[in-house]
Amino acid sequence: MNVRRPAARRPDARGPADLPPPRIMVLRCPELCWPEELSQARRDSGRSAPDSRPPGGPGPPAGSADHGAARLFEQVIAVVTGFCPKVEVVEPGVCAFGARGPARYFGGETALAAKIIAAAADLGVESRAGAAEGLFAALLAARASRPDAARPDAASPGAASPAQAAGTVGSSTAILVIPPGETARFLAAQPVSVLADQELAGLLKRLGLGTLGDFAALPAHDVASRFGDAGECAHRLARGLDSRPLAACPPPADLSVVQEFDPPEPQAEPVVFAAKTLAEQLHAGLAARGLTCVRVQVRATWADGRESSRLWRHDGLLSAAGVADRVRWQLDGWRPEADAGQYPEGGVAALRLAPDLLVRAAGQQLALWGETVVSDRVARAAMRVQAMLGHEAVLRPVIGGGRDFAGQVTPIPFGEKTEPRLAADRPWPGRVIGPAPGVVYPIAREAEVRDDDGEIVTVNGRCVVSAAPARLAVPGEPPRRVTGWAGPWPLSERWWDPAAARRRARFQLATDDGRAWLAVVQDGRWLIEAAYC
């Protein structure tokens, strides 16, 4: 039997592990970026991207009047495309592209960034640039660049040190280039607050891990077992390992979906509705092949033959509603200022969505008690009910602060990002410590608590109990024997306001049916506020 030996490797041959990591450059236009409140809302959906500018998340609200910024950023993208034809729109105001090839042609990354910033300045757009190994570090470098940064040595057209940034056109632009091999050190000095998952960042701070370097020093298997998938992904970013390359690979088959409008559609809403339907068809076709799309190309063809084509990136599954938001934002750049609901030149003739970067679908791990995010189906149903019955017809509970369990829940209309009525980050002295009850009554229930002699248990001004509680009677239920109790815990609120002042004494009572109750004595009456089921 003939045995075929593997070919000997040439001394100068390099395998995939020997290839240098990709150099990514990010251009950020602060004036064209999403507002900070949208960035805060987006942290729940983009868990592995840097703070404030992660790929993915909700787009500008419908009917946004910010389509002027969209038109301006459309021109900026056209300028960047002149230097590098393969540009990713990370989100409005932020784009990224591979810098290795263009930098060689234009004389270095600093020189390339300076030319792009100068071209954007001709449009009246202030911009900043950052370059590093990987998209995560490049985004942080673009955010860390400052207008008053020191200018590097003019004789060195290549990368500057992490402590240096090149001031370029005007006094309101800057460049920060992280040299090859220095990305890990640059990331190590960043605080954990740059991670999109703020719950994870807060937990890391409480554990004494204040920087990405501290987090990256932990063993990967310990991070995966302690923090789960989100922590494992953040740990890779902290070590300078992006989850996927920026360079796009063409899909193995034509999986794009297209909608033609005959006659061309001049209105905005029908086009956005068609985009949502196309996105659902695209996801269904990919799911049948065990794939998912993390970057989608949106191409709109106008009645006069012109095209608008952009790449939109997202870490994870880009929902149908998210695709529709991005189509709306992209096409806003073509609207005239006089009419924000009309498209020029006869309208849109065709809309095509094409998956530009495919990965294998690894599935979605649901929480123990079900989904932790609102699906498109639930969102559509909620918005349909709101359209028929009013905006406040569908409410969702948001947990906040307070001393009473009933006051800690604030009902907020679906779709809004309003903060709870009472902030949860305050100390709230007097609140009940421990697990929250299973049932909180909107109106406290009258009750009677008696001792072994059948007398009502009372609490005096010094918070002394007259006798040990022995029986609990709640209207509508049979009397129960008290098998255990704790308290009283005095609570005096708004003593400075006679009209709103109240004094209470709280108890926790356990009864012989296996239930526990949160009771309170106020003005000589026993009230049941909640039940531990």
Image (cartoon, rainbow, N blue to C red):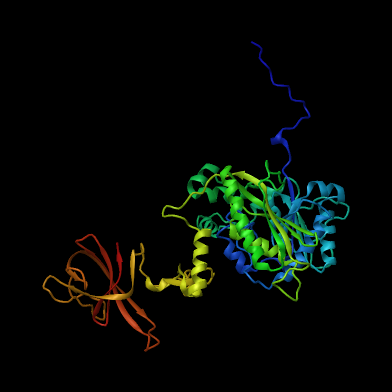
Location of the N terminus (image quadrant): top right
Q: Residue furthest top?
A: 1
**Residue shown at the point (60%, 47%) measured from the top left:** 285
Nearest the viewer among 163 and 366 is 366
Q: Could you say where residue 123 lies in the image, as x and y percent from the top left?
A: 83, 67
**Residue 28 placement, left or right of 392:** right
Quadrant in which residue 519 is drawn: bottom left
Q: Could you say where residue 7 lies in the image, as x and y percent from the top left?
A: 72, 21
In the rendered image, is residue 469 in sight? no
Q: Residue furthest front?
A: 262
Quadrant in which residue 410 is drawn: bottom left
Location of the C terminus (image quadrant): bottom left
**Residue 504 placement, left or right of 179:** left
**Residue 116 placement, left or right of 433:** right
In the rendered image, is residue 434 in sight? yes
Quadrant in which residue 524 is drawn: bottom left
Image height check: is 253 above or below 211?
above
**Residue 180 placement, left or right of 471:** right
Count how many numbered circles sit on residues in the image: 0
Q: Could you say where residue 73 lies in the image, as x and y percent from the top left?
A: 75, 64
Image height check: is 510 above or below 403?
above
Q: Residue furthest bottom?
A: 498
Q: Residue furthest left?
A: 453
Q: Could you say where residue 54 lies in the image, as x and y percent from the top left?
A: 64, 58
**Residue shown at the point (63%, 55%) measured from the top left:** 278
Nearest the viewer among 103 and 254 is 254
